Each structure stands twice: as C-alpha cells, then as structure tokens.
Image: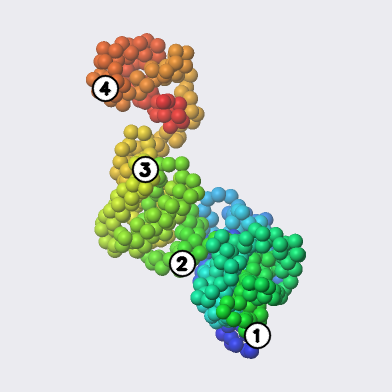
Amino acid sequence: MAPDAMAGPGGDVVPGPTLDRLLSVMGAGVLELCVAPRGLGVVVEGVTVLDPLDRGPARGQVLLVVGVDPRSAAAVDAVREAAGSGAVAVVFGQGGSGPLPEALRAAAEDGGTALLLRTAWCGWTELVGALRAGLVLSGSPADPAVSAVPPGDLNGLADAVAVLVGGAVTIEDLESRVLAYSSTKEEVDELRRLTILGRRVPEWRVSAMREAGFFRALWGSGDVIHRPAHGDNPERLVVAVRAGGEVLGSIWVAAAGGDLPPHASDTLRSAARAAAAHLLHHRSHRSHARLAEDAARALLDGRGSAAVLTERTGIPARGHCAVLAVRTGTSGGAEETAKLCALLTVRCGAYDVTPVVLPVDRGALVLLGALHQDVRRAGEQVARTGAALVRQVADTFGPDARIGLGTVVETLADLPRSRRSADLALRALLSPGEHRTVAFASEVAETIALNQMLDTLTGTAPAPDTPVARLLAYDAGHGGGTMVRTLRAYLDHFGHVPDTARALGVHANSLRHRIGRLTEVSGLDLGSPDARLLAQLQLRLLEREGGQD
C-alpha cells in the first residue's frame, strides 16, 4: 500500500490524511504555515502535545509545543528534537512580534519538519480538538460523488447528496438557517419553498419542533431521523453533522415527486460524515483564496514561506514581483474593506498580472506576481497597474485614494522588502501638502526622509521657551490660532509675502503687520536658518499630532 493511502470499506484504497488536507479541512483559520520543507503532501498520523518530561517517539505526529516562545533558543532545540523523533510538523504559539529567527527556520528545513504557528484567537485546548477532528475528517472515506465536491462548496454538496438520495436537500446550521440547498426540478412543498426564500426555517416551524423536543433528539442522536409525511408535507430525513463530537449543523432531505428510495438513509448517513469537512471549512470562512491570503500575509510579515505561497497560488518563487499598498482615504469599515478587496481582485485581472489581495487596516495590500522578466518593464507594469487602480478606487471611494508602489524584487522571498517600500511611499503620499495619488518610494524620497526624521523626535509638544511654544501659548490666550497658522504659511512659502497673503486670504499689509507681531510675541529670528528649521520641524510635529487646524 502506498504510504499516503489507507484502507477504506471493502479494502478499497483511499487517500490518507495529509498536512495539506488537514489544513484545508480546518480552513487554515487556526494555523499559520511558515515552513514546509517536504511539501504539504506528508501523511499525518496523529496530534501530540509535547511533554518535556516524556519525549517519546512522535513519528507522523503534529507536535504542539506549548509554553515555548518560537523566538527562543528552546524553540530551536524543540524543532531539532521533533525532527529527530519523526514528527511531520511542529506548532508554536505566536510568542512575541516580528519575524521568526532564521535559526528556527533552518532547524525546520534541515530536519524536514513543517513549522506552524497557532493563531492568537485559537487556544491550545480548542486547537487540539480541532486538529483531531480535522484529522478524522481529512482521511474519512466517502461516496466519490460527494468526495469530488471542492471543500466549502456547500451548494455543490447539496446537489451531490440530492442526486444520491433522490430527494430535495437543504443544509442548515444550528440556528436552522439555510447554508445551501439543492437545485431540484421537482415540485417542492410549501415549507421548503418558505425555508429557501427566507434562507431559514420559518420561526413558527422552529418553535413547534423545539417544543416537541425534536432538536434535543436530533443533536443527541448519531443516526438519521425519519419524519413521515403529514398533510401537504412529504416525508423527510434529517441527520446531524458532527466533527470530533461537536455538532456543526444538519442535512435535510425531503421527498420530491415520489417516495424516497430504501437506501436513502444509508446514503445520507455516509454523506453526513463527508459533509463535516465542508461545514468545518465553511464555519472558519476560509476558501482556497483565503488559504492563499494566509500564505501571502505570513510571507509579507516575515514569518511565511515562499514555497508555500507558490504552492497555494501558482506564482513562481523566482520571478519579478512587487507589492502595492492601497488606502481609500475613508474610515474603512469591514464592509468597505471587503468591497475594496473585491474591486482590486477583479481589476488586477485585467492588467495581465497575478494578484493576491490582503485586507489591512483602512485599506489593502496587493501582491503582484509573475511580472515581466525584464526589471525595467516589470517596473512599468507596476506603475501602469497602480495608476489604473487608483483611478478605479477613487471613482468608487472618493478622491482621497492613494497607492504606494513597492520596489520590484526578484523573488517571492524578497517581497517583505517590496512591502516596506510600498508602505513608506503610501505614508508619504498621505502627508500634508502631497497631491500625487500614486508613486514609488524613490519618487517621494524627500518626504520619506522627513517622516523618518520626525519619527525620531520624541514628544508631541514643542520644547518650552522656543518661539513656536510661545506662539502656541499666545494663540491659546487670544483664540483662533492665528499666529501659528500665519507662521506656518509664511515658512511654507519661503517668506514670500504675496504668495503667503494669498494662501491666508489677507492683504499683504495685514500680513506684514502679523509677521511683525508674531516675531515680537515669539522672539523668532526669521533671519536665522537654524531658527527657521527648528520652527518648521516643530510645526510639522504639531501638524502630525493634530495640534494645528
């Protein structure tokens, strides 16, 4: 028998649980894959929590290393020992922030052991249960028609089950909401019609079943329940869908155009086992696109693997690629971010690039892969794509849209560098007085340098007894902030009175009077380059912190 296979009913050989299938069943919502030196096809035989006092053989196991920071020397030792004992994968908690140490990655690569991180929102207890349930589901045999349905395709699953059982199918969650239904051609009963139209079982029907104790019997039963025909309602079969002892939902079959066949219960029982993987996948809201998103995010954050991203997306590990940092300029709620990501994904497809779009706070990151093999033309591709996208984003979300263009790099492993340059460019484009909507970091280098210099300055208030501090105190006592605004405009226009007067909307003589008054109040020597530079820096800091109008 092949090493990645197991015996099914009747001696048939069916694929065994692999790391890839395990992650797919779980939806990758609880684990982040960093390194997979032997690929994702390795067979997983079980899940074990590392016990420092009893480190026995762990061949074929996913080893959970609890209480060890992945950035510590102890983590490197744990990976080496796990590899020596035959573990196929090692899971750590997130630990501190920042990229994982190269020593840890090297230990995993040398030992041929996959390296994963537990996501922050999943505790160790939940992870153990989810892994063991996923392990069972990823290796459980099922009818070929059901097994052929892609993970998470609940409508496809409903259609496949409907064909097998000869009835109309609905798949529901624990609250009797309809997750999917089969597209049957036969005439359906009124209850099914109302359920599908409302995307949930009518409340009066749910209440009646709850009062009769039906749900208690359904969730407590491990078998198919038969509900005979009654009045206009045809006979129905229902079965709970479980994973690792946890109830995920139910599958309902209603007779349509005739009686249900004798084998319907057996078929539904088998389908429920296969459906568990789909419902687990659905519950974590992770499709194949989200698996690719997870791999891209981990790589850009300095934790992931270029090989894993290639496996998930098909983007070659070697070849020009870049990152775009996108900001809409609006508040960016969850619904708006989802709309932005959908727009970027669709639009990128028209520009002959292979994208992976990642939602981030108030915007998105766009990974562009498979760019032109000539670096100059690849840069032109990035520029054209960014310019086209910013127009689309501005048309949809408003004129404040901005896109920072990342440096073109030669491999996926270099993408963190492209991401950093894209973030720097975006931040520069968002700076006051910057009117461009899209740029590379090299095109806004002066603003980037100024931002970095301001970042090194501590405190938000000007040092006491400096001219700007005195002007702030004066404006606070007299109201309006007139003196600070006047000084800022005067310095921004290089002391040119006509331009400054126009910017402030005052007469030139009124401006000259103000300048004389502010120098008297503040003691600022406008003839001193050092004094002007200090004042300009302090005004920039005030502007950044919202201390000026």
As helix, strand or loop, the secondary structure at mark 1 comes to loop
Q: Hey, what amino acid is under mark 3?
A: Gly
Q: Hey, what amino acid is under mark 1?
A: Pro
Q: Residues within 10 Å of mark 3 (few under 14, many from 20)?
A: few
Rendered-image quadrant of the C terminus:
top left
Q: Is residue 393 above or below residue 473?
A: below
Q: CA distance from mark 3 to mark 2?
A: 34 Å
Q: Is residue 434 visible?
A: yes
- The residue wearing badge 3 is 398
Estimate the x, y position of residue 180 in percent, counting from the top left.
Answer: 55, 67
What residue is at 34 percent from the left and 45 percent from the top? 394
Which of the two discs, 4 and 2, labels the residue nearer the N terminus?
A: 2
- Relative to 379, 2 lies left or right: right
Q: CA distance from mark 4 to mark 2?
A: 57 Å
Q: CA distance from mark 4 to mark 1?
A: 88 Å
- The residue wearing badge 1 is 262
Disc on res. 502: 4
Near-viewer residue (56 or 179): 179
Q: Nearer the viewer, mark 4 or mark 1?
A: 1
Image marks 3 and 2: residues in contact by CB distance under 8 Å: no
- The residue wearing badge 2 is 312
Which of the two discs, 3 and 2, labels the residue nearer the N terminus?
A: 2
Q: Nearer the viewer, mark 4 or mark 2?
A: 4
Estimate the x, y position of residue 323 in percent, counting from the top left.
Answer: 38, 54
Near-viewer residue (263 or 96): 263
Q: State the residue lying farthest toward the left.
A: 498
Estimate the x, y position of residue 441 in percent, counting from the top left.
Answer: 34, 45
Which of the two discs, 3 and 1, labels the residue nearer the N terminus?
A: 1
What residue is at 41 percent from the left and 29 percent from the top? 543
As helix, strand or loop, the secondary structure at mark 2 comes to helix
Task: Say which quarter of the image contains residue 269.
Answer: bottom right
